[in-house]
Image: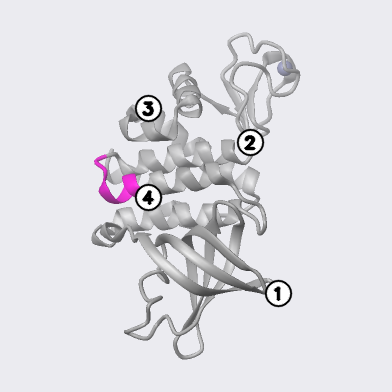
Amino acid sequence: MGLVHTQGVVLRHTNIKESDRMLTVFSPSHGKLSVLAKGCRKPKSRFLSISQPFCYGDIVLKQYRDIYILTQAEVINSYFDLRNDLERLSLASYLLHITEDAISSGEGNPQLFTLLLKALSLMSFGQSNPLDIVLIYELKLLDCLGYRPLLDRCVVCEQDVGGSNSFSLAGGLVCGNCNGQAGDLLLDPVTLNAMAIILDMDIGQLAKQKLMAGVRDQLNKLMPAYIREKLEKEYPSRDFIDRFLTQHA
Ligand SMILES: [Zn+2]
């Protein structure tokens, strides 16, 4: 049985037996891992703090078939401040949810891992608008998975779009000759420009981004549809984000 030493963020937990937990962990090198944390719900357990959602740490695992057993853990950041604000906590939980759907077992994604850590930091400590963090995270997550939208050419014929602002969920702009579909969204040039900047921007610059209200509104219509299309999942929890947008308009 091999030992695996990796970093990880806890995406989800399920209580089992009297004091154990099964954790879903995102490792930058191994992707999605099912990790058994034995006895972690006992008050004096050394795994008590690592076994919470959002917790980021160094972990050592012993592999047993397709399960990993937690043998050592050191917390690097628990993002505890998220618990002080229900809205930020809900939005950060949504980030964990889509991240879990985006990753697979055995496939690392260091770029997405770094993006998640940055987003969780901004969500818990930063002054950034939490909805902006979600929208930027969604767009950059899709880019990390290879679904970078095509914004400078037509996604169908790959020719110049000739000023068309019709965005197809196939993955980018569609020119007038290629006839858009009914579900295409018309995006303002300022939104398209903001998307290009976000896609090219280093993750470290995320804190400086503040979206204009119109851009935020359009991205908040586009991103849920685009995420659903590419991850092939439904997200009923999106409703609360729309309520959030209305409250902070
Ligand atoms: Zn075309």
**Of 176 and 67, which appears nearest the observer?**
67
Of badges 1 and 3, nearer the viewer stands 1
Residue 175 picture quarter: top right
Q: Earlier in the sequence, mark 3 or mark 4?
A: 4
| Tag shown at residue 120 | 4
In 3D space, how far apart are the residues under numbered discs 3 and 2 (Cα atoms)? 24 Å
- Circle 1 sits in a helix, a strand or a loop, which is it? loop
Query: Which residue is denoted by mark 3 in the rendering?
Result: 214
Q: Is residue 114 left or right of residue 76?
A: right
Near mark 4 (Cα within 10 A), the count class, few <14, some 14-19 or many ≥20, is many
Q: Is residue 173 left or right of residue 192?
A: right
- Quarter holding the C terminus is top left
Of badges 3 and 2, nearer the viewer stands 2
Q: Earlier in the sequence, mark 3 or mark 2?
A: 2
Residue 46 picture quarter: bottom left
Of badges 2 and 4, nearer the viewer stands 4
Query: Which residue is denoted by mark 1 in the rendering?
Result: 65
Tell me: residue 208, above or below residue 109.
Answer: above
Q: Quadrant of ligand 1?
A: top right
